[in-house]
Amino acid sequence: EKHKTERAEARQKCAARDWQACYVLAEYQRKGQGGAQDLPGAAQNYKKVCDARDGRGCAGLAYLTVQGRGVTANPAEGRRLYKLSCDLGEVSGCAAWGNMAFTGVGGPKDVNGGTRALTEACDQDYEWACTRMRDLGAFDAHDRSMERLRDLRSN
């Protein structure tokens, strides 16, 4: 099976400190592709990628940490990791951090900061952020994000 081979290759490359491979391995472990689901293993590999300053790893670890999957649930730590992933340029992390800040999960409510992060993610065509802004009623009257969402949907 293709996934089994790719997962084994990713494991070998990750052991050799190929952080892209560690990210691929973490994704396979989280989804249970090419072998058994291994959430603690996925968390460890996402952490390696995050520690290597790749925002995708921080976002993956944040997701597991907020959900309490493979690691102890800790919304405050998840929020911190999403912010770190955002600072490292990962748009999904910016959207998730913005959502947590806006709603006050894992820390104090920061409607302005959350709105700003969600808007920036939406502006980068990250559709979940646009949808979430609409659901939260989070938008700036001077912003074009909602028009952009309509444009995305009509394409």
Image: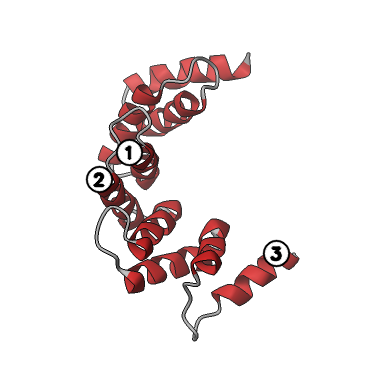
Task: Tell me the SS state at disc 2.
Answer: helix
Q: CA distance from mark 3 to mark 1?
A: 32 Å
Q: Nearer the viewer, mark 3 or mark 2?
A: 2
Label 3 Cα neighbours within 10 Å, binned few <14 / some 14-19 / many ≥20 = few
Q: Amino acid at mark 3?
A: Arg
Residue holding disc 3: 153
- Cα gap from disc 3 to disc 2, whole angstroms: 34 Å
Q: Give 74 or 57, whichever is nearer the viewer.
A: 74
Label 1 sits on residue: 65
Q: Earlier in the sequence, mark 3 or mark 1?
A: 1
Which residue, given by chain and number where applicable, does mark 2 sit on?
77
Q: Earlier in the sequence, mark 2 or mark 1?
A: 1
Q: Secondary structure at mark 3?
A: helix
Q: Secondary structure at mark 1?
A: helix
Q: Nearer the viewer, residue 125 or 64?
A: 64
Residue type, mark 2 in image: Glu
Mark 1 neighbour density, 10 Å: few (under 14) some (14–19) many (20 or more)? many
Q: Residue at position x 31%, y 57% from top?
A: 87
Residue 116 position (above or below residue 131): below
